[in-house]
């Protein structure tokens, strides 16, 4: 039985095709970035329309916090019920589908949360939810 005496060839990875792909990707992104720059600097006059609506999505829900002492805060600012009414009315006029989340402290009086709910109703906001944590089942 003859034995092979030739040295074994070391395995090698051909990097040529990998380098070609990386070079193509670099060129693609460089050219793409250049075109987006050109589009923004082109001197055009944008037309206007009377009945156009914004293309942005719905705004985030307004979070109304009711503390144990009945203090109402929105975005870190303390509000009276009248101030809350003004804020919610302004938000509804900007976006009719505005939603509100009321976070009442579990130890506060139920009436204080109901006051915040009634202000939402008076402001014309119908998408109102009350935040809660699910109870663990025994």
Image: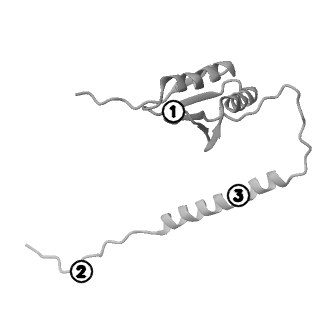
Q: Are marks 3 and 1 in contact (CB under 8 Å)?
A: no
Q: Position of residue 5 (x, y in %)?
A: 18, 80
Q: SS for tag 2?
A: loop
> Considering depth in this image, is 89 or 14 the residue closer to the camera?
89
- The x and y percentages for residue 97 are 66, 24
Query: Residue 101 appears in which quarter of the rendering?
Result: top right
**Residue occupying image coordinates x 37% and y 29%:** 134
Tell me: 19 left or right of 77. left
Residue carrying label 1? 103
Q: Which residue appears farthest toward the front when viewing the image?
A: 69
Q: Earlier in the sequence, mark 1 or mark 2?
A: 2
Question: Is 17 drawn above or below residue 103 in the view shown?
Answer: below
Residue at disc 3, secondary structure:
helix
Task: Say which residue label 2 marks.
Answer: 7
Looking at this view, is 71 or 98 the one in front? 71
Q: On the image, numbered disc 3 is attached to which residue?
A: 33
């Amino acid at each position: 039985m003859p034995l092979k005496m030739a040295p074994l060839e070391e395995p090698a990875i051909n990097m040529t095709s990998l380098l070609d792909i990386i070079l193509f990707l670099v060129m693609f992104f460089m050219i793409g970035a250049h075109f987006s720059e050109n589009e923004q600097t082109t001197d055009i006059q944008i037309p206007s329309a009377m009945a156009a609506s914004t293309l942005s999505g719905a705004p985030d829900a307004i979070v109304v916090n009711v503390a144990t002492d009945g203090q109402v805060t929105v975005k870190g600012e303390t509000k009276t019920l009248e101030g809350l009414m003004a804020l919610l009315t302004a938000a509804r006029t900007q976006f009719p589908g505005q939603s509100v989340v009321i976070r009442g402290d579990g130890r506060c009086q139920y009436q204080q949360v109901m006051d915040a709910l009634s202000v939402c109703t008076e402001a014309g906001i119908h998408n109102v939810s009350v935040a809660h944590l699910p109870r663990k089942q025994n």
